[in-house]
Amino acid sequence: MVIINRVNEIRKKVREWKSKGLRVGFVPTMGYLHEGHESLIKKASEENDKVVVSIFVNPIQFGPKEDLSAYPRDLERDSAICERAGADVIFHPKNDEMYENDFSTFVDMTGLTKELCGKSRPIHFRGVCTVVNKLFNIVCPDRAYFGQKDAQQLAIIKKMVRDLSFDVEIIGCPIVREEDGLAKSSRNAYLSNEEREVATILNKSLMKARKLIEGGERSSKLIINSIIQTINSEPMARVDYVNVVDSLSIEPVENIESSVLIAIAVYIGKTRLIDNFTYEL
Ligand code: AMP
């Protein structure tokens, strides 16, 4: 496995592979990899001849008060994880390789970016769509792998690929969790021991909501209230948002009548964590 920092070099590598008819899988990440990322890389390596993992903490998807400079980084550890999961190349560009000083073109989606994380992080999805666009243009993958952990992001990327006619297949992958149910996340590293225990409240609140829906409850308001109540039972937890939305349009629904996404963002101390489940009706 090799680490490539330059756009021209990764392009050359991918061109070589494609000239031999090889299929390229791509896993975009911000690094500090865990078993969630690893599951995406493994799937990519099972389904493609070559796998590129990008590790890039994308500055333009962070708001001014967010954790860009604190975001955890460990390229050595990430390299070992990529290699053992079957990656062929890590693309690890510096900021100025991706964004020159006069960078001024952004991909800005309407609609799907409005609710959930789009409300609390207004410039986030513009940054995500822009960087994923650039990465797709640089890597030219046949397939790209994204986690259901960021369900809104996955829906947005699928829509963007359709809207802008990208020749890439988007594959969604299930959420990988810790034994106690907490969704794996690079940001879990911020949690103190006490906060780490409290953080299980996210998944607990969602499991309770799922039971209610499975028991026949169809009112989003009731489901949302149940989740908020469970989260508020933990004094160290603070709800950012809880919502029930259509899983394709990401529009809030009043009654659960089709496939819905139940998504939450919760602060545990200063750390903002997200989780979700999809309910197929
Ligand atoms: P990130 O490095 O947080 O930007 O994540 C890179 C990719 O890994 C995204 O497609 C995420 O949805 C996915 N991912 C992150 N955590 C998990 C997880 N626990 N299970 C599955 N996929 C994940």
Image (cartoon, grey):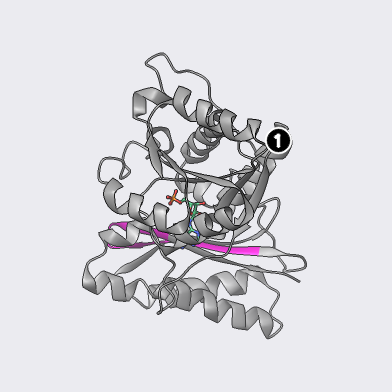
The image quadrant that residue 34 belongs to is: bottom left
Magenta segment, prevailing SS (helix, strand or loop): strand
Whether residue 112 appears in this view of the structure is: no
- Residue at x 30%, y 76% (from the top left corner): 197
Q: Circle 1 is placed at which residue position?
A: 167
Residue 123: image location, x then y, percent: 47, 36
Question: In this rendering, is residue 257 above or below 141?
Answer: below
Whether residue 30 appears in this view of the structure is: yes
Q: Is residue 187 magenta?
A: no
Residue 206: image location, x then y, percent: 52, 74
**Closer to the camera, 152 or 218?**
152
Residue 105: image location, x then y, percent: 52, 20
Q: Quadrant of the N terminus?
A: top left
* Secondary structure under the numbered disc 1 in the rendered image: loop
Compared across the picture, whether 196 is left or right of 264 comes to left
- Residue at x 40%, y 53% (from the top left corner): 83
- Residue at x 40%, y 79% (from the top left corner): 180
The span shown in magenta is: 261-273
**Closer to the camera, 6 or 248?**
6
Compared across the picture, whether 113 is left or right of 5 comes to right
Question: In this rendering, is residue 116 above or below 223?
Answer: above
The image quadrant that residue 158 belongs to is: top right
Q: Is residue 268 magenta?
A: yes
Residue 6: image location, x then y, percent: 40, 26
Q: Quadrant of the C terminus?
A: bottom right
In the image as oriented, which residue stretches furthest toward the top? 102
